[in-house]
Image: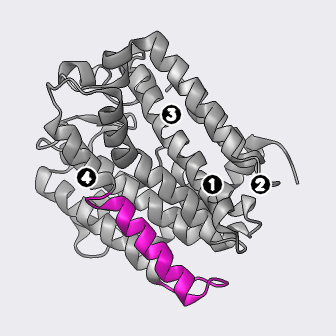
Amino acid sequence: MTTDFSSWSNELLIRTESALEHYLPNAGNAPVRLHAAMRYAVLGGGKRIRPLLAYAAGEACETDPARVTAAACAVELIHAYSLVHDDMPCMDNDVLRRGKPTCHIEFDVATALLVGDSLQSLAFEILSARIEGIDAAQQLNMIKLLATASGSHGMAGGQAIDLDSVGASLTLPELEFMHIHKTGALIRAAVMLGANCGNSRTEAELSGLDHYAKCLGLAFQVVDDILDASASTNDLGKTAGKDAEQNKPTYVSLMGIADARLLARSLHEEAMTALDPYTHNLRLRQLADIIVQRTC
């Protein structure tokens, strides 16, 4: 097995893009505008971090990537829907995402709303179809896992807390609680979905993977906050400085950039330690490095 991360990730990014292309409705099929907008929101952009985490967790649990593809695409579609809705005027009211106009700018607000709804439905349609090598009970658990991570006890709940917190001064535990849900829930779901596609593991082993994902999800958000305050719009592919402009509580506003960087490193170290029980943990470690060290 090659240890070259670039070769491994490129192969799986091609696999994921091809699968998403297959799963998404053809833009020529009615309703044409909605289907075109769905494809616009998903294809040809993004780092695909969540699918890669799913594949890496599957590898840690010694499974074939083909068995992980449906779950990897499902979690990416949930992520894409969340971005479409997050950018809308009733949320963050942003005009740029992945270096191009946001969905509601390129199309319109009503279409963007329906895009998010449709991508969410498609994610569960994919995850509920027969997946070779995974039994029905295991697959039902995966559906429940993604549903919980997406709803009021996960990503949507975190977004609600985020909206309620504008202009407020949160403590570090309050900020962590928000981001464990808003950002962390879907990252944890990606890892655990991949793990559920693999060979059976003990509760202790799965708990270790979940702790890795929890730490990584928080580190991801800490780095996001740092980049929002320090990187350019051109580098980010989205509007920089939005958090400060909207008076949102962030790790940077609470701790300052230097201490936020220390926190990201500490979370990274904790995530790495949680992987110790796994022999095939290289990809998860490499992804953790990339997430914490990224500059865009």
Residue in the foreground of this view, choosing between 63 and 29: 63
- Looking at the picture, tell me which residue is in the foreground, 227 or 62: 62
Confirm or deny contact between disc 4 and disc 1 (CB under 8 A). no
How crowded pointer 4 is (Cα within 10 Å; few <14, some 14-19, many 20+) is rated as some
Dot 3, how many residues are within 10 Å of its Cα: few (below 14), some (14-19), or many (20+)? many
- Residue under numbered circle 1: 209
Q: Does residue 60 appear left or right of residue 15 in this picture?
A: right
Tell me the kind of residue under disc 2. Answer: Tyr
Is mark 4 in CB contact (under 8 Å) with mark 2? no
Q: Residue at x 40, y 30 (%)?
A: 237
Instruction: Name the residue beneath numbered marker 3.
Output: 219
Question: Do the CB atoms of the residues marked 1 and 3 lie less than 8 Å apart?
Answer: no
- Magenta residue check for 262: no
Alpha carbons under labels 1 and 2: distance apart: 9 Å
| Residue 103 seen anywhere in this rendered image of the structure | no
Up the image or down, 167 lies above or below 193; here it is above
Question: In the structure shown, which secondary structural element does the residue marked by tag 4 occupy?
Answer: helix
- Specify which label sits upstream in the sequence, 4 or 2: 4
How far apart marks 4 and 3 lie (CA) works out to 19 Å
Amino acid of disc 4: Gly
Q: Amino acid at mark 3?
A: Ala
| Picture disc at residue 157 | 4
Mark linked to residue 278? 2
Q: Which residues are magenta?
A: 129-153
Q: Earlier in the sequence, mark 2 or mark 3?
A: 3
Q: CA distance from mark 2 to mark 3?
A: 21 Å
Q: Which residue is depicted at the point 23% across and 50% down? A: 85
Q: Taking 264 as reference, is 129 above or below it? A: below
Q: CA distance from mark 4 to mark 1?
A: 23 Å
Say whether disc 4 or disc 3 marks the residue closer to the N-terminus: 4
Q: Nearer the viewer, mark 1 or mark 3?
A: 1
